Image (cartoon, grey):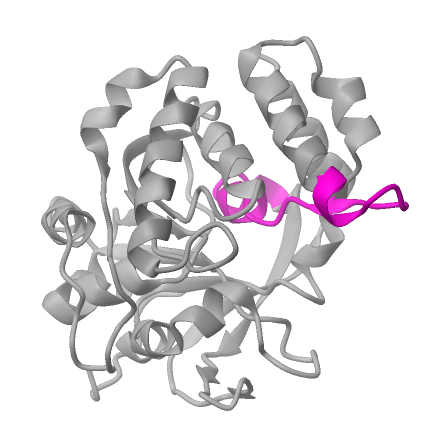
Amino acid sequence: MDNFQLLNIPQIPKGTIDAVLDTDTYNEVDDQFALAYMLRSEERINCRAIYAAPFTSHHADTPAEGMEKSYQEILNVLRLCGREEMAKNSYRGATAYLPNEQTPVLSDAVHDLVARAHEYTEDAPLYVVAIGAITNVASALLVDPGIAKKIVVIWLGGHALHWEHNREFNLMQDIAAARVVMRSGVPMVLLPCSGVVSAFTVSVPELRQWLSDANPLCDYLVDIVAQFEARVAKGKPWVKAIWDVTAVAWLLNDGECFMQDRIIKAPLPEYSHSYTENAFEHSIRYVWNIKRNALFADLFEKLRR
């Protein structure tokens, strides 16, 4: 993993593409939106597999518990979307974070990603949308570094480069994994949280206006955000960032309709919760602006189907 290779900069794909989603689905309330959005964008995205990512929070005391709860929530969202057949392509991921930058955490998700990646090529890659701690993806790259030429990683993680620190949930849970992925030279799109994606917010009244009573999926999504609001806002003005939708949306961003990005030299996440900018010779795409209204319009229209 010490030999960096300059790979192609990811381009917005044309036509229908194959993708997998790596998600800590039970951690908050935004992964459910992202998973449903990918499934409801079938005219553009063939969702080939779904991987449960580990997390620890007030919902889960250990990464293993967080992963299992995420796996069960994946199955719940599949049922609400009427896509139960995807359960056979949904896999449990890591039960722990990387112990270091050389040792993978093996799981069904890792084995599937490694095997699945070999069905693709550098010219026609598999798109890996990662919206949690990036343990599963890093483990797959450690198991088989050659898959870096066959996949494109789209990761929502870390904060904007101009942010005062890099203590972002997805990143800080497994900094070793983020460093492995960035060192691998895999073609990558990075969506920073605070300072960029944090603008993608919605209120409960807006969700109710556009989604309530449309279908069971929409009612569930409104309900989980309303419950989240009741717990954290306690009657004060409040909006929720639906972060993870933006990573899926990059695959739909034809003509920069939903976001804008630029090419930068890959940065290296440090254990001190900072970035070393321009750390590598290889480059990545870095999203710097989200077109909030246009993206929510597309999201709401698809969820209401």
Q: Give the left or right position of residue 282, taking residue 195 as reference.
A: left
Residue appearing at x 15%, y 53% in the figure: 107
Return the x and y of residue 128 as percentages of the image width and height: 33, 50
Q: Is residue 237 above or below residue 150?
A: above
Residue appearing at x 26%, y 49% in the figure: 125
Residue appearing at x 71%, y 48% in the figure: 200
Return the x and y of residue 226 as percentages of the image width and height: 71, 32
Q: Give the left or right position of residue 208, taking residue 256 as reference.
A: right
Q: Quadrant of the C terminus?
A: top right
Q: Is residue 265 above or below residue 20?
A: below
The residue range painted magenta reads: 229-255
Q: Is residue 253 visible?
A: no
Residue 245 covered by magenta stretch: yes
Return the x and y of residue 30 as percentages of the image width and height: 57, 42
Residue appearing at x 39%, y 12% in the figure: 82
Q: Give the left or right position of residue 122, taking residue 161 as reference.
A: left
Q: Which residue is more in the foreground, 77 or 296?
A: 77
* Quadrant of the rendered image containing residue 273: bottom right
Q: Which residue is more in the foreground, 179 or 103?
A: 103
Q: Which residue is more in the foreground, 68 or 257?
A: 68
Q: Is residue 232 above or below residue 96?
A: above
* Quadrant of the rendered image containing residue 207: top right
Return the x and y of residue 26 as percentages of the image width and height: 46, 42
Q: Quadrant of the N terminus?
A: bottom left
Residue 267 covered by magenta stretch: no
Q: Is residue 232 visible?
A: yes
